[in-house]
Amino acid sequence: MDINPIILAIPVYFILIGIEVLYDRLKNKKRYRLNDAITNISCGITEQATGVFVKVFTVAFYHFFFVNFAIFSVPETVFWTVVLFLGVDFFYYWAHRMSHEINLFWIGHIVHHQSEDYNFSVALRQGALQKVFTSVFYIPLAVIGFKTEWFLFIGAFTTLYQFWIHTEMIDKLPRWFEYIFNTPSHHRVHHGRNEKYLDKNHAGTLIIWDRMFGTFQKEEEKPDYGVTSQTATFDPIKAHIDPIKALWKNMNAFEKSTDKLRVLYKSPAWLAKQPQVDLPTHPVEKYNSTIGSDRGYYILFQYAIILGITAFFLFQFSTFEIVTQVSFLAFILFSVMAIGKLLDQSKTGSNLELLRLFVTLIFTLTVSVSSMFPTLLSSSIILLEMISLIWFFNFGISAKPVKY
């Protein structure tokens, strides 16, 4: 169980996204926007890059309870694997539901719901803080006696299942399947900000939990995707920080300390009804920004480089010293932020991107000297960044309409 199924599935994710993009273009469905899709993946990069540090605490948290409080020694048989799967899925339902019903937990999960499109790339859009808040829900499984590695392995497969339900390509499935399992139709409801769809269908794999606990809603009219307080940015770092700032602002809208505390554990629905809180109005149109076609292709080119460096970091993380790990993390977060600013057409976007290109060159030269990058990889990145600098100065700004 040393193999992480999620890591192995990453190439499959991108192949499926590519197939969906191709289908989208052939059918002219316009379900993909370059700026939104890149931001979704950037949020996923942010979650994965920070997650290698966070899991030191979240996994250790589960393992602590398993080592010190396990009641039974559960055998790793087929029967108990099924029991563990049901347990993971059951507690996922409650962790997910509470992430919608408790304001403090919501700041960890809201990132996943910010996209106003609905496609496979949305499945990769995850909040970096989510596991910090939800890890406590799985402690009963540790106390029962399910080994840490076993729990992580089964948990990974429940996560994998949820990728394919983030699509509009698949309509409703046979009634028996829709009754038992979570499906694209059920999960489209979950991502809708229509009033009737809010806080519904929290299931991971089995929709039976929603049916049992009164949170099921079938898909009727087409969902309006996103969150009620629109995330008006394609910068993944800002997308993570803004909900925290909003929660802090809402807490300060109350005078009494007890009321401030209540804001943390009450629900977003409760908060919206408070006269002290001035929430943004429901968005009428999707947040968007028009970029030139040259800049669009330039961003795709840069993004491929960032993905390559991120993949190297994730696969080689355990071989690095802590200073190198933190340096990689800072570099990756700065890179996706700079790309986000470009997509936002921010005034600082071009300056940040130019700085990012020089930082990438310096960073690559530094790690290549220390032999952390293979020679071929570092040489390739340096060559690509030199091409990028020339491209940036000649074609970085364009008034042509984006064709993607």
Image (cartoon, grey):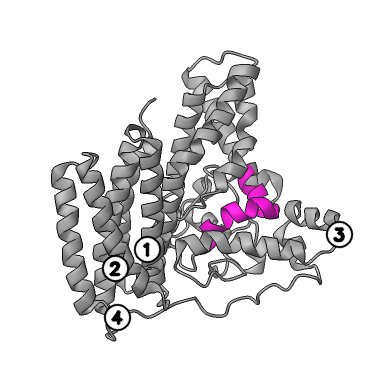
Which residue appears at 47% of the width and 40% of the height?
Answer: 53
Q: Earlier in the sequence, mark 1 or mark 2?
A: 1
Instruction: Please determine whether, in this image, residue 369 is positioned above or below residue 348.
Output: above
Mark 2 neighbour density, 10 Å: few (under 14) some (14–19) many (20 or more): many
Looking at the rendered structure, the kind of residue marked 3 is: Lys
**Identity, as a three-letter code, of the amino acid under mark 4:** Gly
- Magenta residues span 95-114
> Disc 4 vs disc 2: Cβ atoms closer than 8 Å?
no
Q: Look at the image and say whether residue 113 sits in the magenta stretch.
A: yes
SS at circle 4? loop
Visible residue check, residue 68: yes
In terms of secondary structure, where does tag 2 sit? helix
Are discs 1 and 2 less than 8 Å apart at CB? Answer: yes
The circle on residue 292 is 4
Location of the C terminus by quadrant is: bottom left
Mark 1 or 2, which is nearer the eye? Answer: 2
Please name the residue shown 59% across and 37% down the image: 135
- Residue depicted at 65% across the width and 77% down the height: 281
Label 3 or label 4, whichever lies nearer to me, is 3
Which residue in the protein does label 3 denote? 256
Residue 299 marker:
2
Question: Mark 1 = which residue?
Answer: 38
Mark 1 is surrounded, within 10 Å at the Cα level, by few (under 14), some (14 to 19) or many (20 or more) other residues, namely many
- Is 104 or 270 nearer to us in this picture? 104
How far apart in space, not on screen, are marks 4 and 2 (Cα)? 11 Å
- Dominant secondary structure (helix, strand or loop) of the stretch shown in magenta: helix
Q: What residue sits 52% from the left and 73% below the top? A: 232
The kind of residue tagged 2 is Ile
The vertical placement of 271 against 4, above or below, is below
